[in-house]
Image: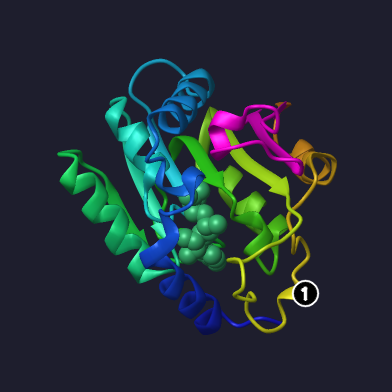
């Protein structure tokens, strides 16, 4: 099994270089625009309350705040949260960022219009319990958006993920079929959108499975 302090330490250590990856930092205009367009297509029109779980350095939170949404980001890693706060502040945007476990986001009984999570579920010791918890944080009629995949490698290249990671249920990522089977009983509508074919999202072509699951609660 993995333990939470070693997971936090791993991501704290990853925070400084995290945005160097094209799909993390969204520094290229084309990549940024591609993610912005996707988020716009998934979110309802108007100003939504969005919970970004496992927000990392806040790149998607920033795009959402830019579009006028009210964003709350939660991440286990204090250094990721520091960077997310700094990123929005530097852009003159507002957002709330909290250090906390995705398994139980520290947002009390607040309900959100949208819960977004990108590339997180593979790290969770009990992802199915977390999904149940997340759906409970979304108002009836709200939207769950999970951007996920099944990768050839997990963890930063050359840096193995935490000891015991191979016992994580979705280590290496989760296929759309497996994630859909876990989410379907919790929601009223669900669709899968493949994201593997759009090289702009990733900073180049990819050959592994990448997709978004978008569901109505
Ligand atoms: C691959 S990164 C994705 C970050 C961000 N969602 C993105 O797409 O750029 C995974 C993030 O999940 C966070 N994380 C890992 N386990 C977590 C947990 N149990 N609770 C909250 N955040 C967690 C890490 O600190 C890291 O920021």
Q: Quadrant of residue 64?
A: top left
Q: Is residue 207 magenta?
A: yes
Please, which colouring scheme is shown? rainbow
Q: Quadrant of residue 154?
A: bottom right
Q: Position of residue 170 (x, y in %)?
A: 76, 60
Note whether 28 is above or below 22 in the view shown.
above
Provide the secondary structure element on which disc 1 rests: helix
Note whether 51 is above or below 74 in the view shown.
above
Residue placed most toward the observer, 23 or 105: 23
Q: Is residue 115 left or right of residue 195?
A: left
Q: Position of residue 203 (x, y in %)?
A: 54, 38
Q: Is residue 196 magenta?
A: yes
Highlighted magenta segment, given as a residue range: 193-216
What residue is rendered at 38% in x and 44% in y? 59
Q: Residues within 10 Å of mark 1 (few under 14, many from 20)?
A: few
What residue is rendered at 65% in x and 50% in y? 131
Spot the residue most to the top: 45
Q: Is residue 155 left or right of residue 208?
A: left
Residue placed most toward the observer, 41 or 204: 204
Q: Is residue 48 in view? A: yes
Q: Is mark 1 within 8 Å of ligand 1?
A: no
Residue placed most toward the observer, 181 or 8: 8
Q: Quadrant of residue 129?
A: bottom right
Note whether 3 is above or below 26 in the view shown.
below
Q: Is residue 10 left or right of residue 122?
A: left
What residue is rendered at 46% in x and 32% in y? 31
Task: Work out which quarter of the rendered image holds the N terminus and state it.
Answer: bottom right
Q: Is residue 53 in view? A: no
Q: Position of residue 166 (x, y in %)?
A: 77, 74
The residue indicated by pointer 1 is 166
Q: Position of residue 101 (x, y in %)?
A: 49, 66
């Amino acid at each position: 099994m993995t333990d939470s302090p070693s997971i936090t330490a791993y991501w704290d250590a990853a925070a400084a270089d995290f945005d160097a990856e094209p799909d993390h930092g969204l520094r290229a205009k084309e990549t940024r625009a591609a993610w912005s367009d996707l988020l716009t297509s998934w979110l309802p029109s108007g100003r939504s309350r969005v919970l970004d779980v496992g927000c990392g350095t806040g790149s998607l939170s920033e795009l959402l705040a830019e579009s006028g949404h009210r964003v709350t980001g939660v991440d286990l890693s204090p250094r990721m949260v520091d960077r997310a706060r700094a990123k929005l502040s530097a852009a003159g945007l507002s957002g709330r960022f909290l250090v906390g476990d995705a398994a139980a986001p520290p947002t009390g009984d607040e309900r959100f219009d949208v819960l977004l999570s990108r590339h997180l579920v593979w790290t969770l010791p009990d992802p199915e319990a977390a999904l149940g918890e997340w759906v409970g944080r979304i108002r009836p009629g709200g939207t769950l958006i999970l951007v996920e995949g099944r990768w050839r490698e997990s963890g930063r290249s050359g840096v193995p993920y935490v000891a015991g990671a191979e016992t994580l249920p979705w280590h290496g990522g989760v296929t759309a079929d497996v994630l859909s089977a876990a989410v379907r009983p919790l929601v009223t509508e669900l669709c899968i959108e493949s994201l593997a074919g759009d090289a702009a999202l990733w900073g180049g072509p990819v050959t592994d499975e990448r997709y978004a699951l978008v569901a109505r609660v």
